[in-house]
Amino acid sequence: MAEQRSFSWGRVARLFTPHRGRVALISVLVFGTAVLGVVNPLLIQVTFDDGLFPADGGDTDLQLVVVLCAVMLLVTLMSTVLGVVQTITTNRLGQDVLRDLRESLYRHLQNLPLSFYASSRTGDLQSRISSDVGGVQTAVTTTLSNILSNVVTLISAVVAMLILSVPLTLLSLATVPFFVVATRVVGRRREAFTA
């Protein structure tokens, strides 16, 4: 029976080491997309507070409203373009990492003794290789990018909320533990029903 290795972040990092330039680019794109996603709510506040309903009780400043709407449209377009570039870059990075992983796996299989192949069924071996590499592909192209994106989006959203209203932000954050507990309880019950 083959030795079972535990998960290692170091091994995952070594897969990405030859591609660190693209990893940095993806990180910048994720950060840029998250920051741009927070800009529009801030611009909406300015539109209402200064353009539509000025604090001094003056008339609506239509020129300011038009400029702010144009900026919001531009921000949305930039965010969309960055998102597309991020998706393409992430998928290409994932394909390249998988190619490297497959080549490494092939070299390893070439160096195994013949006794290994005599004691292993070929179909099981091929199935295992295909499913494991497919799982790695999903993790590389989707999961890692989503984790980074979600963390950056959460941080930028909290910052934007604090800028808009500190009391409402604190009230919103105070409810988070209740939702976490409820999610865990429902998740355990669902798991018990489906098991």
Image (cartoon, rainbow, N blue to C red):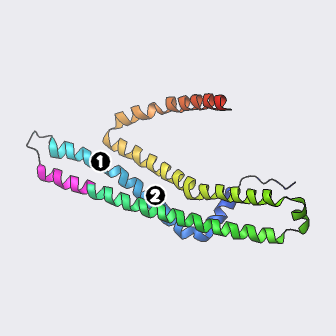
Mark 2 lies on residue:
30
> Which residue lies at the image location 11% right of the left edge and 48% below the top edge?
61
Q: Secondary structure at mark 1?
A: helix
Say which quarter of the image contains residue 189.
top right
Q: Quadrant of the N terminus?
A: bottom right
SS of the residue under disc 2: helix
Relative to 71, 152 lies left or right: right
Q: Amino acid at mark 1?
A: Leu
Count neighbours of disc 2 (C-alpha within 10 A) and say few if under 14, some if 14 to 19, many if 20 or more: many
Please report the residue visible at 52 percent of the width from the left and 62 percent of the height from the top.
90
Q: Residue 11's x, y, as percent?
A: 69, 61
User: What residue range appears in magenta?
Assistant: 61-72
Residue 42, label in figure: 1
Residue 2 occupies which quadrant of the picture?
bottom right
Q: Identify the amino acid type marked 2.
A: Val
Instruction: State the residue in front, 162 or 141.
Output: 141
